[in-house]
Amino acid sequence: MQHDDVIWDLIGNKSFCSYKVKTKTQQFCRNEYNITGLCNRSSCPLANSQYATVREEKGLCYLYMKVIERAAFPARMWEKVKLDRNYAKALEQIDENLIYWPRFIRHKCKQRLTKITQYLIRIRKLTLKRQRKLVPLSRKVERREKRREEKALIAAQLENAIEKELLDRLKQGTYGDIYNFPIHAFDKAMEKQEEETESEEEEEEDEEESGTREFVAEEEFEESDLSDFEDMNNLKGSSDEEEDAEEQSSEEEETEEELEEEKTKAKSKGKTPLKGPVRKKRAYVEIEYEQETEPAQKSKAT
Amino acid sequence: MKSKGDISPVQEMEQAEIEVTENKSESGACFPPTFSVSEIKNKQRRHAMFLKLKEEKRKQKLELKKKKKKERKALGDQAPPKEVPKTIENQRIYDETTVNPEDEEVAFDEGTDEFSAYFNRLTNPKVLITTSDRPRGRTVRFCEQLATMIPHAHVYYRRGLALKRVIPQCISRGFTYLMVINEDRKVPNGLVLCHLPDGPTAHFKVSSVRLRKEMKRRGKDPTEHVPEVILNNFTTRLGHSIGRMFAALFPHDPQFVGRQVATFHNQRDFIFFRFHRYIFKNEKKVGIQELGPRFTLKLRSLQKGTFDSKFGEYEWVHKRHEMDSSRRKFHL
């Protein structure tokens, strides 16, 4: 015999129900056949001998019904009816199957069906959009990679490599006539070609001195406009390494003539970028003087 | 060495200590030749034995060194040249695809590959930088800084668009590169570099990103001048193609007036990117000052054609179990 009230008295209020989840304000029911999800007298599948639910499996909705006649046969207790994919037709099917059933259960079944169809539509829409794929990281591998990266960084000696590369490019003459001291390269090239003459050496030495003097003096000059450089770049032409030999030989001939030009070009170098690396050293000094409390300690330490 | 299994623990300990002291008092080792430290069952004693063994080995090594040094001194000028220490770069397994500078086949390939248009000066680079969905502040700032470094670069917000739809639009607007910076947990961690007309797509893992304000002793912001490009250590065929990919990001003619240089340095399959400003103090010395962000890249896959992760043809994919098994084998 089914004594629903007795069952409810036991599990609902007084004693224990394993499907019940209690929170501060509400009680929920974890039973998979529960229609609302709350723990109520009318929604408890255990405490109602006539009960119905709508559940979804793999995108299809089914109507489950339980009647008192089958209460003695647990294996056959729930009757499963497949609902139509069409929402309106499914609603009609529910009405048809649950005709003469209490209003509450019919209403809640239809509400549940509505919610289920809504989320199924959403799933279908989302799968069409871009799916973000989460790739799991292996902690061991990540640690290993990080360590290898650090070691590689140390082995790379980046700054030395970059400086070496830049000096090589300078020697090869890719920079053309911008810098007025690739005399060393000229010397080497000349030694290789075995065309040294004393006069040339003397001239080059003079130019070296004058070059360095010019360079130092240029730091005091103010910035000049960018447009000048673009013009000068156009004058010099492209900077391909293939034109090295030509440039070297041409430079040797034109060094005297270009002294004046070099002055202006060197002037152009006296822009803010020049202050950058020089500022490296200055900045360090400035920090000591500018800060208020800390430098006292720093100066003592140093 | 007495057998230690029979005696009680306390006595064993005492005996061990006595033996240890005895061994220490003796100058040389007295380990019988078939003895192995791993056969001792007791952990503490095993550890003690192991430490002794190490000590012995260290002593021997020192003696050997001293002897060699003496011999060197004695020989003076006739001493054999100093041996070169082994480094990972020395011991690197030779890769068959290492490119010989005079290789004709490679030269021919490079004359006809997707970058030939750039290297023949038919196209100018134009880069579109974007991110994955909903980028956080760090990634956004990283993109902005990248855009200041790479000339003709534009940053666009992603807005949840699919890359396959973005690419035809980019091509129609004349972009040559698409750079997508992937983000995970508010930090950039991936880079997809896609050469646009129909070019290869490279997917990198990004690590150690330092934005400009996190860098110590940096210079002012980079100017609009076209920087020079330095590509170091791209030796194999794969490395070569990746190197060309990086080179094609920047316009052809660097403006030496700007004195800025972007470096891609490959070391043990990690590509370090740095952006510097240089100044020649004299012909033997150059000072460099780092501007700009820095990051390291590690190539994960290179795919022929534009971005198509499902049906694309992959030229190279990093397979961890095959490729990471040897510590001396590198692919770039």
Image (spheres, coloured by chain):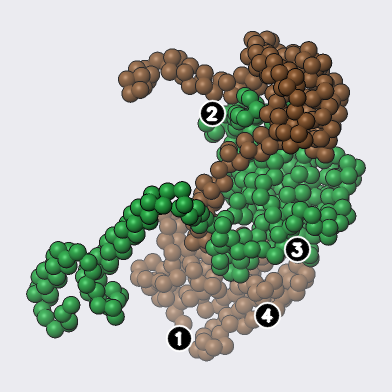
Residue in the image at 71% along x and 47% along y: B180
Q: CA distance from mark 1 to mark 2?
A: 87 Å
Compared with residue A47, is residue A161 higher up or lower down, i.e. above or below?
above
Is label 4 in a helix, a strand or a loop? strand
Q: Are marks 1 and 2 on the same chain?
A: no
Q: Residue at x 69, y 10 (%)?
A: A222
Instruction: Sort mark 1 into few (<14), some (14-19) or many (20+) by Cα contacts within 10 Å.
Output: few
Q: Callout 3, which amino acid?
A: Glu
Count residues near mark 3 (Cα–Cα under 10 Å), then give few for <14, some for 14-19, many for 20+.
some
Q: Secondary structure at mark 2?
A: loop
Identify the residue at image location x=11%, y=69%.
B18
Q: Tell me the mark number nearer the camera, choosing from 4 and 2.
A: 2
Q: Chain of mark 2?
A: B
Q: Which labelled disc corresponds to residue B315?
A: 3
Q: Between marks 1 and 3, how big is the CA–CA gap?
A: 73 Å
**Could you tell whether B77 is left or right of B187 in the image?**
left
For label 1, the residue is A1
Q: Marks 4/1: CA distance?
A: 26 Å
Where disc 3 sits, the SS reads: strand
N-term mark: 3 or 2: 2
Q: Nearer the viewer, mark 4 or mark 1?
A: 4
| Residue at figure coordinates x 69%, y 23% from the top left | A181
Q: Nearer the viewer, residue A99 or B196?
A: B196
Task: Identify the amino acid type marked 2.
Answer: Arg
Chain whose colour in the figure is brown: A
